[in-house]
Image (tube, grey):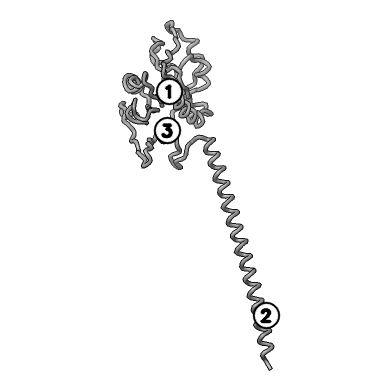
């Protein structure tokens, strides 16, 4: 990846036009998006949140015009690689593309009745024009708002091309993000982010519980094998003792029969 650009008091030392920042309007169906946003963003924070060169933000502004601060967009989640995270938080009021030197690399939108049309329309066109490498959409209804539960697109020669959606026999769907190295999935009820090598969730808590369960299962198997070995050894010793007793009996009988 490219070298990290350091941000130092950029907005404090430059003379920029007066900009009025207003809070984003809350939509009535905002809460419908929250479980999915919380789930996926939490997993990606787990994966990248401790890296000083990876900026992750949910609900914040991405401003893209230095002459007009109101020309901005607020994705449900966005990620930028190879940036100075501390510098952004300390010196910029929002994600200013012209100061940071690049657009976010990843954007996620979650559908709601009031936002779906924008996510499929002008937002998609804007993200493509800004050069955002991957654009993902998640539909908590399954398909009512976007037409499918998951849609991921990558930028190829300046145009978005959709990732292939894999259908499971159980009705689940999956798509692989090349940028993030995860597989996004929908099982009919919940979205998840999976490790492409194992097919298991990248949720550290669940993974830890799975490892603990696996360790307990291995311990149970080991104990069963040991018990089986001890039983076999005990049975072998019993058979050996019985054989020795039978041999002694036969020898005694033979001794009585000899003149």
- Which quadrant of the figure has residue 66? top left
First along the sequence among labels 3 and 2: 3
Q: Name the residue under label 3.
A: 189
Please report the residue visible at 45 percent of the width from the left and 11 percent of the height from the top: 23
Q: Can residue 87 be seen in this view?
A: yes
User: Secondary structure beneath disc 1?
Assistant: helix
C-alpha gap between disc 3 and disc 1: 13 Å
Q: Do labels 3 and 2 touch, CB within 8 Å? A: no
Q: In this view, does 159 lie to the left or right of 233?
A: left
C-alpha gap between disc 3 and disc 2: 72 Å
Task: Classify 226 as above or below 160.
Answer: below
Q: Mark 1 points at which residue?
A: 32
Identify the residue at the far top of this view.
18
**How many numbered marks have been drawn onto this rendered protein structure?**
3
Task: Classify 128 as above or below 24.
Answer: below
Few, some or many residues within 10 Å of mark 3 (<14, 14–19, 20+): few
First along the sequence among labels 1 and 2: 1
Q: Mark 2 points at which residue?
A: 248
C-alpha gap between disc 1 and disc 2: 84 Å
Looking at the picture, how far across and down is residue 38, in whole percent? 48, 26
Q: In this view, does 72 lie to the left or right of 11?
A: left
- Which quadrant of the figure has residue 68? top left
């Amino acid at each position: 990846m490219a070298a990290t650009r350091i941000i130092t008091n950029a907005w404090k030392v430059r003379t920029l036009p007066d900009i009025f920042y207003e809070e984003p309007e809350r939509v009535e169906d905002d809460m419908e998006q929250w479980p999915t946003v919380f789930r996926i963003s939490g997993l990606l924070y787990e994966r990248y949140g401790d890296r000083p060169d990876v900026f992750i933000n949910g609900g914040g502004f991405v401003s893209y015009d230095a002459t007009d601060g109101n020309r901005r967009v607020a994705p449900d989640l966005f990620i930028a690689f190879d940036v100075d995270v501390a510098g952004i938080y300390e010196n910029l009021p929002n994600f200013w593309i012209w100061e940071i030197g690049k657009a976010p690399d990843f954007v996620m939108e979650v559908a709601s009745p009031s936002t779906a049309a924008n996510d499929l329309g002008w937002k998609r066109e804007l993200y493509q024009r800004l050069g955002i490498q991957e654009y993902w959409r998640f539909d908590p209804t399954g398909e009512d708002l976007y037409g499918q539960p998951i849609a991921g697109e990558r930028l190829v020669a300046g145009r978005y091309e959709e990732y292939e959606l894999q259908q499971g026999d159980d009705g689940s769907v999956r798509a692989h993000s090349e940028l993030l190295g995860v597989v996004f999935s929908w099982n009919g009820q919940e979205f998840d982010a999976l490790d492409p090598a194992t097919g298991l969730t990248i949720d550290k808590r669940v993974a830890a519980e799975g490892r603990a369960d696996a360790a307990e299962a291995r311990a149970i198997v080991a104990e069963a094998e040991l018990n089986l070995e001890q039983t076999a050894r005990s049975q072998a010793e019993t058979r050996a003792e019985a054989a020795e007793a039978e041999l002694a009996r036969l020898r005694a009988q033979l001794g009585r029969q000899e003149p």
